[in-house]
């Protein structure tokens, strides 16, 4: 039975499109821009206020009441160390873990932002260059993974640890696989054997390649592969018929997940009911239901993105979808 999960996006790793007011007076996006442009004192005040109010214990209670089993908690490396332009905040992570335990929820702790940025997107903490593969950033990131495993490995709420979110590695595939191998064994040496160690596919088209390469490394039985099958941002998606979107779910996606899950356990770490264009409520409901059906058959768990996204409709489960099941 696949477990139902929800992402706590936009909270401890902010994203401008989800938390616009946090970025008032700031050019660009990514948390580092706040500290660089407003100075540490104002950034600390603003970001800590956001962390204290955007998600609270009441959200964890409500998440459980909505029938979820798991939360996926995106974190950035800067929460656990002092980093230029960022505001640390490990106490917020500890608080989240404790709230989850108190409300009978498990947590997938997801390293969403790595040293140097693994994708140059705002949800890695900073936009622009992908410097994760330069210098000693991968080694520093493994240090963060070891810290997370040591600090939270025996916490009663921990379900698993995700080694990296959505890396961009079109021409750096081998270095990424090398990182995954090293980070996997670093985590496995510190985590209890029942905890999942999760790797994220590079891009959907390369997930089979990633699965094959990881298989060659003979990684252990804690390994789980995370896939993010979105339709909302595909090129020219507004011109695609609703039937075609549904056909993809029940055809290509079903086939792909069935194939990969035979060799390595999978989760759907991010997914959404959101579609491009202006689909009808009926179309979105069927799109939602069909995804849940497919993920429930092949994935250990599936995590909707996201729990809370003010004024963003389909992306805000709390506000839009409490009666969808």
Image (spheres, rainbow, N blue to C red):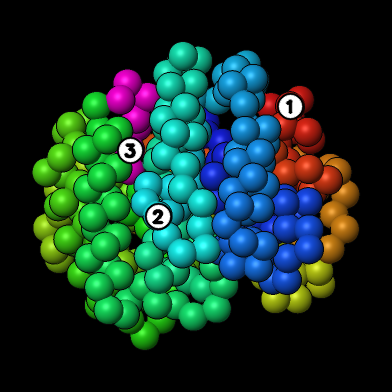
Q: Position of residue 70 (x, y in %)?
A: 47, 30
Whichever of labels 2 and 1 marks the residue nearer the N terminus, that label is 2
Cα distance between the residues tagged 2 and 3: 25 Å
Total count of labels? 3
Observer-side mark, 2 or 1, equals: 2
Name the front one of labels 1 and 3: 3
Measuring 69% from the left and 71% from the top, which residue is drawn there? 28
Task: Please state if 53 lies on the left or on the right of 183 as rendered.
Answer: right
- Disc ID at residue 160: 3
Q: Quadrant of residue 188?
A: top left
Res. 75 in view:
no
Q: Horizontally, is 70 left or right of 180 in the view?
A: right
Q: Tell me the SS state at disc 2.
A: loop
Image coords of residue 139 (percent x, y): 22, 65
User: Which contiguous range is marked in magenta?
Assistant: 155-161
| Marker disc for residue 82 | 2
Say few, some or many: other residues with alpha carbon within 10 Å of mark 3 (under 14 / 14 to 19 / 20 or more).
Answer: many
In this view of the protein, which residue sits in the foreground, 37 or 157? 37
Q: Secondary structure at mark 1?
A: loop
């Amino acid at each position: 039975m696949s477990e139902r999960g929800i992402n706590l996006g936009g909270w401890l790793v902010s994203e401008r499109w989800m938390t616009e007011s946090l970025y008032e007076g700031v050019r660009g996006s990514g948390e580092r821009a706040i500290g660089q442009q407003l100075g540490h004192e104002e950034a600390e005040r603003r970001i800590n206020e956001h962390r204290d109010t955007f998600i609270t214990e009441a959200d964890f209670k409500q998440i459980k009441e909505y029938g979820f089993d798991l939360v996926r908690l995106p974190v950035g490396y800067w929460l656990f160390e002092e980093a230029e332009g960022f505001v640390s905040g490990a106490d917020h992570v500890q608080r989240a873990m404790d709230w989850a335990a108190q409300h009978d929820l498990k947590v997938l702790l997801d390293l969403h932002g790595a040293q140097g940025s693994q994708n140059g997107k705002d949800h890695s903490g900073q936009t622009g260059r992908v410097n994760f593969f330069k210098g000693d950033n991968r080694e520093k990131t493994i240090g963060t993974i070891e810290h997370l495993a040591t600090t939270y490995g025996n916490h009663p709420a921990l379900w698993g640890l995700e080694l990296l979110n959505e890396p961009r590695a079109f021409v750096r595939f081998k270095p990424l696989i090398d990182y995954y191998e090293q980070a996997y064994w670093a985590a496995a040496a510190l985590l209890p054997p029942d905890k999942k160690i999760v790797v994220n596919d590079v891009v959907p088209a390369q997930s089979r390649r990633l699965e094959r390469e990881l298989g060659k490394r003979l990684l252990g039985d804690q390994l789980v592969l995370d896939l993010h099958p979105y339709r909302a941002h595909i090129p020219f998606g507004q011109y695609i018929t609703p039937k075609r979107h549904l056909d993809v779910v029940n055809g290509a996606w079903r086939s792909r997940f069935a194939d990969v899950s035979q060799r390595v356990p999978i989760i759907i770490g991010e997914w959404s009911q959101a579609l491009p264009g202006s689909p009808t409520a009926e179309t979105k409901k069927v799109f939602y239901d069909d995804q849940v059906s497919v993920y429930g058959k092949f994935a250990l768990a599936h995590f909707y993105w996201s729990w809370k996204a003010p004024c963003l409709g389909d992306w805000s489960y709390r506000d839009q979808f409490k009666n969808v099941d």
